Image (cartoon, rainbow, N blue to C red):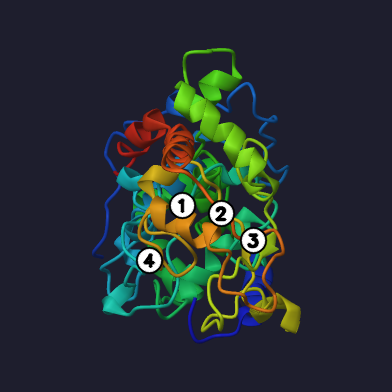
């Protein structure tokens, strides 16, 4: 996110609710049978009544996700920052947007979005159907005007066909946002060793990983990185800095107690998604452990649960083993085949 206030993007989301680039496949390699189902230990995936799943809108959303025409210079797409080969995250501290412009946030991993109640690091966007509007129009990301990009893409014959098949209407902003949401809602990851252990496979996690899981609970990590999502979807200040260049949730609430608060990220596939934190300032999982072990930087809004602790070498290795056990290699393999 860049120069415009968050309120602008929320307003744009509300409005949307009421050339060079990837080209459509002549024979799409996917059908709905190829999608990953919700694991049995997850809650039921409930599709919105106004945006049920069908193959045409999913195929349209998939192509839009990889389409460079969404950027003002035709050089990047959603998949540039949310790279399937790195678990829908990105290996850079801050990924340059269109034209090489750089913002100030690390790209979040896109996973299990169907169950998220709110989006973006401030948690200020309430639906996946409107989430895409901020990066689309943000100058440091895709940098496009919504109406202009919709008018351009509406001329694509295959996109027009999918719009009619999937929504029974021409390609417009409604179709654009909801087809992207349909695709993103199917990015489901729940087949890591930890998941197989939950489902009764006692050998799925190593003894070290199981010890690390107990330590994860003992250190209160699981109070924020909770449930099968490994996030509470809430915003917290974890004492990453004494002063924050990016004020976080304060941009949404204008409440000084929210300075430096950001939504808890999921730890799913965490071994694939370095660097870490909202600004990509911690390069490795060892750096993340060090940050928490030192007790944070002492910001006035720092969550009191961020307090110093000591770990022996073996305990650190166990904690890392547990985080490795959250890696769903089958999800990464599947998502790496999604590009048209």
Of the pair 222 and 250, the residue shown nearer to us: 222
What residue do we see at 32% from left, 59% from top?
A: 80
**Rendered position, 31 above or below 102:** above
Q: Which one is earlier in the sequence, the residue at label 1 or at label 3?
A: 1
Question: Where the C terminus falls, by quadrant?
Answer: top left
Q: Which one is earlier in the sequence, the residue at label 3 or at label 2?
A: 2
Q: Which one is earlier in the sequence, the residue at label 4 or at label 2?
A: 4
Q: Between label 3 and label 4, give the one nearer the viewer.
A: 3
Q: Which one is earlier in the sequence, the residue at label 3 or at label 4?
A: 4
Q: Between label 4 and label 2, give the one nearer the viewer.
A: 2
Q: Are marks 1 and 4 in contact (CB under 8 Å)?
A: no
* Quarter location, residue 74: bottom left
Q: Is residue 160 left or right of residue 259?
A: left
Q: Are marks 2 and 1 in contact (CB under 8 Å)?
A: yes
Residue that numbered label 2 is attached to: 265
Q: Which one is earlier in the sequence, the residue at label 2 or at label 1?
A: 1
Q: Between label 1 and label 3, give the one nearer the viewer.
A: 3
Q: Which mark is residue 307?
A: 3
**Rendered position, 339 above or below 44:** below
Residue that numbered label 1 is attached to: 109
């Amino acid at each position: 996110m860049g120069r415009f206030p968050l309120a602008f993007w929320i307003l744009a989301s509300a409005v949307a609710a009421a050339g060079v680039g990837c080209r459509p496949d002549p024979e799409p390699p996917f059908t709905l049978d190829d999608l990953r189902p919700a694991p049995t230990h997850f809650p039921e995936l409930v599709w919105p009544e106004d945006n049920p799943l069908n193959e045409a809108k999913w195929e349209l959303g998939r192509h839009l996700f990889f389409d460079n025409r969404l950027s003002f210079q035709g050089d990047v797409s959603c998949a540039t920052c949310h790279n399937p080969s790195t678990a829908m995250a990105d290996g850079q501290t801050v990924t340059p947007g269109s034209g090489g412009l750089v913002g100030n946030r690390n790209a979040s991993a896109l996973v299990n979005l169907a169950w998220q109640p709110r989006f973006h690091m401030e948690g200020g966007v309430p639906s996946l159907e409107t989430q895409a509007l901020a990066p689309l129009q943000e100058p440091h990301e895709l940098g496009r005007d919504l109406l202009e990009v919709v008018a351009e893409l509406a001329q694509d014959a295959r996109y027009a066909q999918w719009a009619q098949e999937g929504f029974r209407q021409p390609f417009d902003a409604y179709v654009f946002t909801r087809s992207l949401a349909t695709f993103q809602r199917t990015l489901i990851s729940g087949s890591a060793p930890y998941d197989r252990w939950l489902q009764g496979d006692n050998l799925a996690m190593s003894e070290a990983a199981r010890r690390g899981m107990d330590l994860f609970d003992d250190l209160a990590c699981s109070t924020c990185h909770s449930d099968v999502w490994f996030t509470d979807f809430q915003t917290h200040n974890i004492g990453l800095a004494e002063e924050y260049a990016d004020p976080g949730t304060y941009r949404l609430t204008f409440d000084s107690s929210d300075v430096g608060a950001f939504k808890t990220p999921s730890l799913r596939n965490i071994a694939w998604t370095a660097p870490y934190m909202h600004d990509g300032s911690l390069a490795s999982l060892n750096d993340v452990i060090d940050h928490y072990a030192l007790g944070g930087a002492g910001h006035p809004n720092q969550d009191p649960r961020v307090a110093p602790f000591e770990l022996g070498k073996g305990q650190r290795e166990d904690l890392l083993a547990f985080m490795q056990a959250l890696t769903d290699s089958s999800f990464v393999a599947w998502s790496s085949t999604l590009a048209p």
